[in-house]
Structure formats: C-alpha cells, structure tokens
Image (cartoon, rainbow, N blue to C red):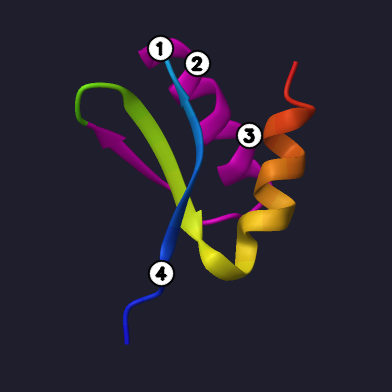
Amino acid sequence: MEDKQIEVFAGSPWEVAAVSNILTAAHIENHVNDWRTMTISVPFEEYVMASQLVDNRF
C-alpha cells in the first residue's frame, strides 16, 4: 500500500529546495511536486514533524 502524501510547503523553487534539504537532513522522506506552484509533500506519518521543521525553517 502506498503511503498517503500530505502537502507541507509551497513556494518558489529556491524555497522548495531549501525546505526539501532541511527535511532530508532530518531523515524525513519528501517529494517535490512541480505543477503550477512547487510544493513538497511528506508521508502522513511524518506530517507533524515535517510541519514543525517547516514552520521553524528560517
């Protein structure tokens, strides 16, 4: 069964790259989506930790 993904961040390409690097450094699996707006999604189980890192990123 595939893990449900939840969006945790949307922003410019450089912001998405920075946030993705932060999540990766914290060993949080993340996926960058490049549609109209670049977004990052994470597995449901890691959403709380990921959103806390995103909120405190800068």
Q: Nearer the viewer, mark 4 or mark 2?
A: 4
Quadrant location of residue 21?
Answer: top right
Quick one: label 3 or label 1, which is nearer the N terminus? 1
* Residue type, numbered disc 2: Glu
In this figure, which residue is indicated by the disc labeled 4?
A: 4
Residue 36 at x, y percent in the picture: 21, 22
Residue at the (32%, 78%) spot, across then down: 2
In this figure, which residue is indicated by the disc labeled 1?
A: 12
* Residue type, numbered disc 3: Ile
Residue 45 at x, y percent in the picture: 61, 70
Q: Secondary structure at mark 2?
A: helix
Quarter of the image with the N terminus is bottom left
Q: Whole-Å distance between the Cαs marked 3 and 4?
A: 21 Å
Q: Whole-Å distance between the Cαs marked 1 and 4?
A: 24 Å
Residue 56 at x, y percent in the picture: 79, 27
Side of 52 relative to 19 (left or right): right
Asked if the residue under mark 2 is in contact with the one under mark 1, i.e. CB atoms within 8 Å, the reply is yes
Instruction: Classify mark 3: residues with Cα within 10 Å, few (<14), some (14-19) or many (20+).
Output: some
* Residue type, numbered disc 1: Ser
Quick one: label 4 or label 2, which is nearer the N terminus? 4
Q: Secondary structure at mark 3?
A: helix
Residue positioned most to the bottom: 1
Region rendered in magenta: 12-34
Q: Is residue 41 magenta?
A: no
Quick one: label 3 or label 4, which is nearer the N terminus? 4
In this figure, which residue is indicated by the disc labeled 3?
A: 22
Q: Whole-Å distance between the Cαs marked 3 and 1?
A: 15 Å
In this figure, which residue is indicated by the disc labeled 2?
A: 15
